[in-house]
Amino acid sequence: MAKNTHRTAEQMAAAQREISVSEFFAKNRHLLGFDNPRKALLTTIKEGVDNSLDACEEAGILPDLLIEIIQLQEDRFRVVIEDNGPGIVKAQIPNIFGRLLYGSKFHSRRQSRGQQGIGISAAGLYAQMTTGRGPRIESKTAKGKPHRFEIQMDFSKNKPLIAKEEELVEWHQKQGTRFEADLEATYQKGLRSVDDYMKQTAVSNPHARIRYLAPGMEEARVYERAVEELPALGEEIKPHPYGVEIGELMKMLRDTSSRTLSGFMQEEFCRVGAKVADEICTNAKLSKKAYPSRIAREEVDALYRAIQATRISAPPTTCLSPIGEERILEGLRKECDADFYSVVSRPPSVYRGNPFQIEVGIGWSRAGSDRLEVDETGRILKTRKRGTADTEDLLGGADDPIRLLRYANRVPLLFQQSACAFTKSIIQTAWKNYGLQHPRGSLPLGSAVIFVHMASVWVPYTSEAKEAIAPYPEILKEIKLALQEAGRKLGQFIRKGKRVEREFEKREYIDKYLPHVGIGLQEILGLSNEQREETVATLRDSMESTRKI
């Protein structure tokens, strides 16, 4: 007979305990992008590169990065990421690399690649889970001494354990940070690989110099910087009232140091002056001199509704740092050998009180190995051969789906393409109007690259793995407007190119048969060979002059 296994409330209560964020993600590492060994390698490198680029830009240093993948065993690899950034002070190294949700960017309303303080520490966590060895970090600040740490993570407490610490006598750079981790992984080439990620990173960060060495390479591949200026660093802003929900508003009211409700609205939010603050208080039927922390829950609800009903200016966009049309063009030209480029940068917009900006670039090539070069009037200048295989791998054939490059705050998004707002917007755009084949419900076809970038203080990723953008209506609208503007330029070029190709074919046809016309005239008019050649040359010059007109 089966034994009764029912438990009492007291027994169930005794089994309950708190778990740390490290312990949670150790059991659910797929949420952070460590789904499988191949993706784990890419995620580790991506998080390290993001940290390095952010650190260099914040310190005003042109990034010079080294990324190495060293194969230790069939399924074990060592990842090395080194930068020339400002370095990390000794006391912060264990926390940054050995504690999840630790960082300076979560509460900062300014554009940056990292947001949650999870990425690089999660990479160290994965390394420790799969190989038993935590990350090793070497770092030197401009005025400090170089230090080396080997870190383990205490999952149950989300705290770093220092396995080894030493002060180095000297370091090979004046300043910077070097991260090493051994992990269980798989290295493969092709789409959505580390190789692909590095190339796409070079496109969106033309100010960075990147040296990349992977298994099978005899020497490092170098992506030289195309521009010598750093992107403008976004300014930090306060939250916008439209982006705050009731629960967060209640917390802000409890924590504020303001002594009046009107002062609270002006000090804790952007775009709220004395007039707007008084209007919100009046609409909420609350005294502008009310003490913020003493406002009841029902009054907070009224305050929240009053904020939504009050007209408030959009948040400032000085917090954004878009790539810019010129830099997108430089990045595409550097890594994509196309015939035509179209770049559009939309004015900033807002979703849920968060400013964002959409940028789009298109690179397109005609099918075939030869390409026509034309001037602004459409005259044919010459034909040229396509570039090397290394520069054209971003472009497919005329009957292949276009290559979509998705970016959020300059970071390539390689996975979950179908779930991304970028992909949805491209599929919903009528590309047949712009000269591309477009099967219903899928990406357009053609030898083209479409670059889409979103710059925002808070990117609405669909998961902690940061692989796709949530389809907010405001975001979808801006993407479609940018795509349509860039598409119109592409359509004009394709139509002009078709006219030029037809003209080129006619000219070749005439050039082919003009000598035979000369022979016929010679027989009819009794011309000499010299007169025949002169007549043919005159006819050719006459047709060329007519074509130019």
Image (tube, rainbow, N blue to C red):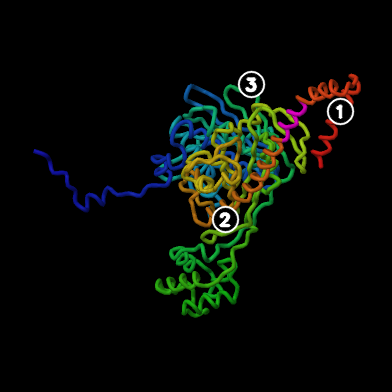
**Residue 120 pos. (x, y %):** 53, 41
Do tag 2 and tag 3 residues touch (Cβ < 8 Å)? no
Query: What residue span does the magenta drawing correspond to?
Result: 503-511
**Residue 408 pos. (x, y %):** 57, 47
Q: Is residue 103 above or below residue 212?
A: below
- What is the crowding at mark 1: few (fewer than 14 residues within 10 Å), some, or many (at least 20)? some
The residue that label 2 is drawn on is 108
Residue depicted at 57% across the width and 28% down the height? 69
Q: Is residue 111 visible?
A: no
**As drawn, is 112 to the left or to the right of 19?**
right
- What type is the residue that disc 2 sits on? Ser
- What type is the residue that disc 3 sits on? Glu
Residue depicted at 51% across the width and 45% down the height? 427
**Residue 246 pos. (x, y %):** 44, 66
Name the residue furthest top.
529
Q: Is residue 255 above or below residue 16?
A: below
Q: Toward the viewer: 70 or 444?
A: 444
Residue depicted at 49% across the width and 66% down the height? 252
The residue that label 1 is drawn on is 537
Is residue 506 found inside the magenta-colored segment of the image? yes
**As drawn, is 24 to the left or to the right of 215?**
left
The residue that label 3 is drawn on is 218
